[in-house]
Amino acid sequence: MRILAIESSCDETAAAVVENRINVLSNVINTQIELHKLYGGVVPEIASRNHIENISTVVDKAIYESGLSFDEIDAIAVTYGPGLVGALLAGVSYAKGLAYALNKPLIPVHHIKGHISANYIETPELKPPFICLVASGGHSHIVNVKGYAEYEVLARTRDDAAGEAFDKVSRVLGFGYPGGPAIQKAAEKGNSDAIHFPRVNLKDKGFDFSFSGVKTAVLNYINNAEQKGEEINKYDIAASFQEAVVDVLSEHLIECAKLTGADKVALAGGVAANVPLRERVKNKAAEAGMGFYFPNMKLCTDNAAMIGCAAFAEYENGVVADLSLNAIANLPL
Ligand code: KG4
Ligand code: ZN
């Protein structure tokens, strides 16, 4: 079975052809990062319009690079939430049109299920159950992946997502958008022990995250220094902030996995591209005797191959949409 998948939930217009769950025949991504950089973050209206302008070319390219024709595709999959509603609608509308014109089934896919599924493409021998940390610009979840289509959310953020905190701190430090890669690069030149930013621990309420405190602590640190006329070392701030976030993400993931008796942990989402986070989780997982999995950089950030992979599990469970399918900005997992 071959699925043509479409993803447009944020600032990447993406299409991919995936065969038999994990065999990626093409994976085309048109990123809008350059367009949004000017504003220091994603502007929803600009994102929606740009998806509409590019989606047809991106889909055609995915088909071309797969070496197949539209007739050889068995189903169309599309991200229908969560995400920016206008951006999602561009993909959902296009996918509906395509499914109707080609007379193929339409499979609606949850964006987070896609991020988690990127791990199956990267490591074909990985099978559920495992505990996955999904950390992106919009989400920070710890998910018990019980089956290919069975998920239980064990923890989530109470306020900002981890990637959102990276983006905001990067903006105030003047490192630009997207913040994650910029902070990671700046942190290489800084001392991660220079400043102790808070590690908010809501353990009495389970393993939920809170990142607004560390973000505010960084802002206060900068404001205080400016008021006193003291010079700040942006690289030390970046390194110390990253250290605080990596500490919390890795500790919650491993402790949560221990509590559930899991023997495997995985990372997913844009923040999973963070090298210090990968290193830390790798070490903690090894100490705890757990297997550790993560997707390559291209599969961490938004792409359609992961959506195609997740679509197989949905289809096996009989999840098919009709032409009334709508985009849902805050779709729960
Ligand atoms: O998964 P993704 O592409 O889009 C969403 O679903 O949100 O994640 C984008 C987020 C951004 O906040 C970006 O700053 C962050 O992932 N990110 C990183 C890194 N690369 C991307 N965060 C930390 N370190 C990175 N290397
Ligand atoms: Zn994403």
Image (cartoon, grey):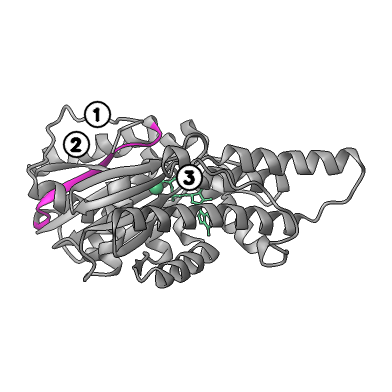
Q: Residues within 10 Å of mark 2 (few under 14, many from 20)?
A: many
Going by the numbered disc 2, the residue's amino acid type is Lys
Q: Vertical placement of 115 versus 295: above or below?
A: above
Is ligand 2 less than 8 Å from the beta carbon at label 2?
Answer: no
The CB of the residue at mark 1 lies under 8 Å from ligand 2: no
Residue type beneath disc 1: Asn
Marks 2/1: CA–CA distance = 10 Å
Q: Which residues are magenta?
A: 72-84
Q: Mark 3 or mark 1, which is nearer to you? A: 3
Left or right of 124 on screen, residue 217: right
In which quarter of the view is residue 111 placed?
A: top left
Percent position of residue 199, x then y: 59, 48
Q: Which residue is painted at 24% across and 46% down in the image? A: 151
In which image quadrant can residue 62 be found?
A: bottom left
Query: Does residue 305 appear anywhere in the picture?
Result: no
Q: CA distance from mark 2 to mark 3?
A: 27 Å
